[in-house]
Image (cartoon, helix red, strand yellow):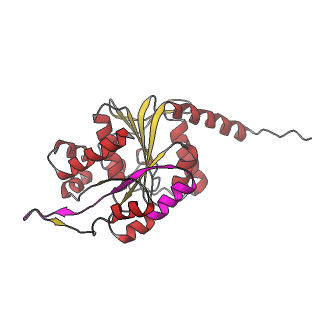
C-alpha cells in the first residue's frame, strides 16, 4: 500500500481548518444575512442588526463577504483597515467596544478598485476571514453575503455549519422568486432558516401619512407562509436611511427612536435575540 504524500498545502489547509474550528467555538451565534436578488438592502439590514445588537450589550462581529461589492465600509464610519497582529492573525476594525468589522472594502487601495477573482481566490479569502481574524468571544457574528447562491454563500454555509440564515427580500414577485431559491439553497445544505425580513415595505406619505406600496405589499409574509419559514418583520422605506448611508453615517438612524424604521428593526432584534 502506498503512503499518501502530505504536501505543504495539505498541512496549511489542515492548520486552517483547526483555526476555523477554534475561532467558531468562541462565537455563540452566527447569522448569515443573504438574499436571492441584489438591491434589496441586505447590507443595510446586516449593518443595522449588528449595530443594534452591539448597542444592547452583545459582543458582535460584522463580516462582509461581498468581495466584489463591499458596501458596509461605505455606510458606517470605518477609518483604516485591518490590523496585522501576527503571522496568520488579523484584528477587525474596532467600531465600538462591542462591535468589530471586517470587509474587503478595508483592503482596497481605492474605493472604486475592482476585485477580479475567480472562485478559488474568493473561497480562500472567506476562509481567511474566519480563520485568521481574531474575533475573540462573540455573542453574534453577522455575515453579509452577496446575492445569489454562488461561491461566497456556499463557502460560508460549508464553513460555518451552524449558521442561521436571515433572508432579505422586497415585496415584489421578481424579488420573491429569487428568495424562494435562497430558501431551497438553505434546505439543501441543511442550514437553519432564522426567518425572512421584508425590506422596503411601503413608504409613509410625508403629506397625508398614508402608506404607499411602492414595491407592492405583503409579498414577503405570504411567501414565508407558502414556503413554511418564519416571517420576522417588515422594514418600511425611509429616505433618511438612504441619506445617512450615503454619508457613511448609518448609525445615526439609531437616534430616531420614534421613527417607524427604528421600531421595525427593534422588533426584529427582539426576535433574533430570542432565537
**Residue 76 position within the rendered picture, expressed as x and y whole percent measured from the top left:** 30, 45
Q: Nearer the viewer, residue 146 or 76?
A: 146
- Provide the residue span drawn in magenta: 180-207
19 with respect to 30 (left or right): right
Q: Nearer the viewer, residue 269 or 227?
A: 227
Identify the residue shown where x is 28% and y is 34%: 56
Which quadrant, please, contains the C terminus? top left
Residue 226 placement: quadrant:
bottom left
Residue 78 placement: quadrant:
top left
**Residue 209 position within the rendered picture, expressed as x and y whole percent measured from the top left:** 10, 62
238 with respect to 97 (left or right): left
Work out whether residue 4 can be spotted.
Answer: yes
Identify the residue shown where x is 36% and y is 52%: 43
Work out whether residue 78 can be spotted.
Answer: no
**Residue 233 position within the rendered picture, expressed as x and y whole percent measured from the top left:** 30, 53
Is 119 magenta? The answer is: no
**Residue 103 position within the rendered picture, expressed as x and y whole percent measured from the top left:** 43, 45
Q: Residue furthest left?
A: 207
Q: How many marks?
A: 0
Residue 59 placement: quadrant:
top left
Which quadrant, please, contains the N terminus? top right
Q: Nearer the viewer, residue 224 or 79?
A: 224
51 with respect to 11 (left or right): left
Is 205 magenta? The answer is: yes
Amino acid at each position: 500500500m502506498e503512503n499518501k504524500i502530505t504536501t505543504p498545502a495539505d498541512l496549511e489547509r489542515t492548520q486552517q481548518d483547526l483555526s476555523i474550528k477554534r475561532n467558531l467555538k468562541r462565537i455563540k451565534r452566527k447569522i448569515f444575512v443573504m438574499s436571492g436578488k441584489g438591491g434589496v438592502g441586505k447590507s443595510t439590514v446586516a449593518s443595522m442588526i449588528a449595530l443594534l445588537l452591539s448597542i444592547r450589550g452583545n459582543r458582535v462581529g460584522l463580516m462582509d463577504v461581498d468581495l466584489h461589492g463591499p458596501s458596509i465600509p461605505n455606510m458606517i464610519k470605518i477609518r483604516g483597515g485591518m490590523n496585522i497582529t501576527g503571522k496568520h492573525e488579523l484584528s477587525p476594525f474596532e467600531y465600538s467596544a462591542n462591535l468589530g468589522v471586517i470587509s474587503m472594502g478595508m483592503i482596497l487601495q481605492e474605493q472604486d478598485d475592482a476585485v477580479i477573482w475567480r472562485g478559488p481566490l474568493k473561497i480562500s479569502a472567506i476562509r481567511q476571514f474566519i480563520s485568521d481574524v481574531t474575533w475573540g468571544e462573540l455573542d453574534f457574528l453577522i455575515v453579509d453575503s452577496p446575492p445569489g447562491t454562488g461561491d461566497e454563500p456556499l463557502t460560508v454555509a460549508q464553513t460555518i455549519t451552524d449558521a442561521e440564515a436571515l433572508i432579505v427580500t422586497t415585496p415584489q414577485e421578481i424579488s420573491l422568486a429569487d428568495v424562494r431559491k435562497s430558501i431551497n439553497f438553505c434546505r439543501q445544505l441543511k442550514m437553519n432558516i432564522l426567518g425572512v425580513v421584508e425590506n422596503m415595505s411601503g413608504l409613509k406619505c410625508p403629506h397625508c401619512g398614508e402608506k404607499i406600496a411602492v414595491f407592492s405589499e405583503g409579498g414577503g409574509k405570504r411567501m414565508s407562509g407558502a414556503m413554511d419559514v418564519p416571517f420576522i418583520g417588515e422594514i418600511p422605506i425611509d429616505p433618511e436611511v438612504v441619506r445617512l448611508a450615503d454619508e457613511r453615517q448609518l448609525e445615526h438612524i439609531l437616534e430616531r427612536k420614534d421613527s417607524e424604521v427604528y421600531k421595525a428593526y427593534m422588533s426584529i432584534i427582539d426576535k433574533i435575540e430570542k432565537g
